[in-house]
Amino acid sequence: MGKFEIKASGSDKCMFNLKAGNGQVILTSQAYASMDGCKNGIESVRKNSQSDAQFERKTAKDGSPFFTLNATNGQVIGKSEMYSSTDAMENGIASVKKNAPDADVVEA
């Protein structure tokens, strides 16, 4: 089972990673100014991860595929790692869809 791991990020900010059951990071958030903002971001991932339309598939300058998960207002909620192939990226999206709704929230 996946988990959202909240950790400190820089001066008085926090962010989260969504990790799959195997511990691999599948989505990384922006930095939030408050813990409440970070927890709201997690709830937004839970909700928006169930709609394929909210995933934006992209290609980095070096050709590596990656994705962002966007809120309904278009704001990026989280970003994936760079993948070696489009198939690997699609597996990452499937993992976010599977893990996000019921993932525990822990503070690192």
Image (cartoon, helix red, strand yellow):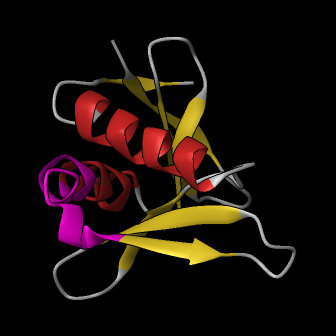
Let me know if residue 30 appears in the view. Answer: no
Residue 61 position in % (x across, y down): 82, 82
Q: What type of secondary structure mainly makes up the magenta span?
A: helix
Residue at position x 14%, y 60% in the image: 51
User: Of 108 and 64, which appears nearest the observer?
Assistant: 64
Residue at position x 21%, y 61% in the image: 52
Residue 68 position in % (x across, y down): 46, 68
Residue 65 position in % (x across, y down): 65, 64
Q: Is residue 97 magenta?
A: no
Number of labels in the image equals 0
Let me know if residue 5 appears in the view. Answer: yes
Residue at position x 58%, y 55% in the image: 86
* Residue 33 position (above or below residue 38): below
* Residue 52 position (above or below residue 18): below
- Name the quarter where the C terminus is drawn: top right
User: Of 34 and 77, which appears nearest the observer?
Assistant: 77
Residue at position x 56%, y 76% in the image: 58
User: Of 18 and 95, which appears nearest the observer?
Assistant: 95
The stretch of residues the image draws in magenta is 44-55
* Residue 99 position (above or below residue 63): above
Q: Is residue 45 magenta?
A: yes
Q: Is residue 65 left or right of residue 45?
A: right
